[in-house]
Image (tube, rainbow, N blue to C red):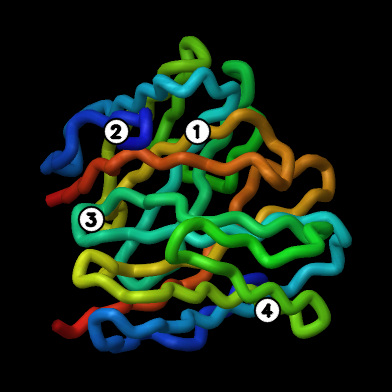
Amino acid sequence: ETGVTQTPRHLVMGMTNKKSLKCEQHLGHNAMYWYKQSAKKPLELMFVYSLEERVENNSVPSRFSPECPNSSHLFLHLHTLQPEDSALYLCASSQGGETWDTQYFGPGTRLTVL
Amino acid sequence: AQKITQTQPGMFVQEKEAVTLDCTYDTSDPSYGLFWYKQPSSGEMIFLIYQGSYDQQNATEGRYSLNFQKARKSANLVISASQLGDSAMYFCAMREGRDSSYKLIFGSGTRLLVRP
């Protein structure tokens, strides 16, 4: 029970589909993150939002489109994905961007692209 | 060069014994934070313990302690009195202070299996 929820927990989609992942944090934090965890690779930071403003975008393909309507909600819109995009997508939140700010993670969405 | 190195892809430990998971890091920033997370098979990353670069004492949280050796740039996690529920992936991560970076850099992880 970390205060960060993600829906759906599992998603299977075709390469031509459009879907969205949702993340909600109940911790009163100001920063939210999307990470990608592929098999046999370290966690990769995708996007960071601080106070609803995108502060980092780590060279993520445009088929991934983040949206942060407020400090409690974060979305990842997906379209025309590739099979190599199949992975666990983790959302996290933290109070801010200081070195001591702990990031708290949600349970993840396991995405399979057919 | 890798920023965070976890050299043990997998480890076994007997229930009730202690185990040390290794982590070395590389940074030229004097201000940084080190974190350990646990990831069970369910997928959620669970925060365990934090050590700041300026902290004088090693961090402890219940059965978890961090053996911080700054000169060696190592931050090993020690789990005392292992329990079956400790079986999981464990990740070491670092956050550097430059430009108030939000980025948390993860190692490749160690899979721990606790034997009954």
The percent coordinates of residue A63 (x first, y second) are 38, 37
- Per the image, the residue denoted by label 4 is B74
Distance from Cα at disc 3 to Cα at disc 4: 37 Å
For the point 58% across and 46% down, the residue is A58
For the point 18% across and 49% down, the residue is A113
Chain under callout 1 = A
- Per the image, the residue denoted by label 2 is A79
- Per the image, the residue denoted by label 1 is A93
Q: Are marks 3 and 1 on the same chain?
A: yes
In this rendering, the answer to whether B68 lies above or below A66 is below
Q: Which mark is residue A83?
A: 3
Distance from Cα at disc 1 to Cα at disc 4: 26 Å
Q: Secondary structure at mark 3?
A: helix
Q: Amino acid at mark 3?
A: Pro
The percent coordinates of residue A57 (x first, y second) are 59, 39
Distance from Cα at disc 3 to Cα at disc 1: 27 Å
Q: Do callouts 3 and 1 mark residues in contact (Cβ within 8 Å)?
A: no
Q: Secondary structure at mark 2?
A: strand
Mark 3 or mark 1, whichever is nearer to me: 1
Chain under callout 2 = A
Q: Secondary structure at mark 1?
A: strand
Task: Return the residue found at the far top.
Answer: A70
In-front residue for pair B98/A3: A3
The percent coordinates of residue B102 (x first, y second) are 66, 42
